Image (cartoon, rainbow, N blue to C red):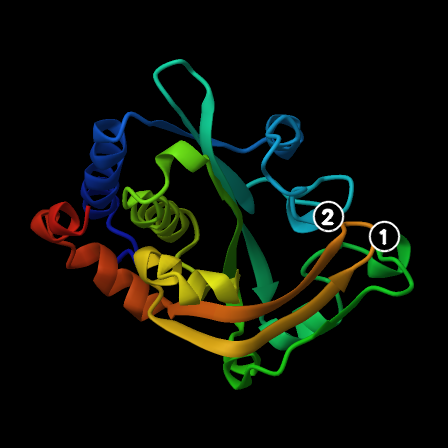
């Protein structure tokens, strides 16, 4: 039987990005307990509140359907965080999941504010279906910025998501400034589209207009199986 995921190849891919993080003075680890994740992110003064989809008090994350990444410096101080989770959209699509607010809350009728809203006009969002890995809640400490670390963060999450889930799509939402300042390019997103989400979450104090960014499973597989160590070295 042929496996979709080659663990050895994925481990080689991840090793390159992990080694790159070490060279930057960051030690990476993966966690599964989102109560622990929230307790960590709550103590980061410059990070905005954790997205509700990664908060167990707002969204149930079943075992094996979510993880988070932590990076610490040589003093064991938090340098970066980000998180990912898997959605089963076999009977839906990403646009519907956004506009129903189910991306953010397990039960919008219980947890969403009456004035919460989300509008998605990105045409490709309706084509994103099946097993969908959503990456978000990115935060990188100021003194580690402009060093190519977003590429490392994206590489680790893509490798882990592929190994755990082999999703049909990997996607996220990105604020427009990330495109304008070149941060989106550092993350290496294959596709981006305007109108990903016009979002207003009252109690979360979130008001933003985001781009939709995504990769297909085949694009993710090619990225992992055709990676080149020299390409990463040049980029960093």
With 159 as the anchor, is 36 left or right in this view?
right
Q: Which residue reaches farthest bottom?
A: 123
Q: Is residue 55 above or below residue 179?
A: above
Q: Quadrant of the C terminus?
A: top left
Helix, strand or loop at disc 2?
A: loop
Mark seen at residue 59: 2
Q: Quadrant of the N terminus?
A: bottom left
**Mark with earlier residue (2, 1):** 2
Q: Is residue 192 above or below residue 104?
A: below
Residue beneath the point at 40% across and 13% down? 75
Whether residue 93 is visible to the viewer of this picture, yes or no, is no
With 105 as the anchor, is 91 left or right in this view?
left
With 180 as the anchor, is 68 left or right in this view?
right
Q: Residues within 10 Å of mark 2 (few under 14, many from 20)?
A: some
Q: Which residue reaches farthest top?
A: 75
Mark 2–mark 1 distance (CA, rounded to whole Å): 9 Å
Residue nearest the observer in this picture, 214 or 180: 180
- Does the CB distance between marks 2 and 1 fall below 8 Å? yes
């Amino acid at each position: 039987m042929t496996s979709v995921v080659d663990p050895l190849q994925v481990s080689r891919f991840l090793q390159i990005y992990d080694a790159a993080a070490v060279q930057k003075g960051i030690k990476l680890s993966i966690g599964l307990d989102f109560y622990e994740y929230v307790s960590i992110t709550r103590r980061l003064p410059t990070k905005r509140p954790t997205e509700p989809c990664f908060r167990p008090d707002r969204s149930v994350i079943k075992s094996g359907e979510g993880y988070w990444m932590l990076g610490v410096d040589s003093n064991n101080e938090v340098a970066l965080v980000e998180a990912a989770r898997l959605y089963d959209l076999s009977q839906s699509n990403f646009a519907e999941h956004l506009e129903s607010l189910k991306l953010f809350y397990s039960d919008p009728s219980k947890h969403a504010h009456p004035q919460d809203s989300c509008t998605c006009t990105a045409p490709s969002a309706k084509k994103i279906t099946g097993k969908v890995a959503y990456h978000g809640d990115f935060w990188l400490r100021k003194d580690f910025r402009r060093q190519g670390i977003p590429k490392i963060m994206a590489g680790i999450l893509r490798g882990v998501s592929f190994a755990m889930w082999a999703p049909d799509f990997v996607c996220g939402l990105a604020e427009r400034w990330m495109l304008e300042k070149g941060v989106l390019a550092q993350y290496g997103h294959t596709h981006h589209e305007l109108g990903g989400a016009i979002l207003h979450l009252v109690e979360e104090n979130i008001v933003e207009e985001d781009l939709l960014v995504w990769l297909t499973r085949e694009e993710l597989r090619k990225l992992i199986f055709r990676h080149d160590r020299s390409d990463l070295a040049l980029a960093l």
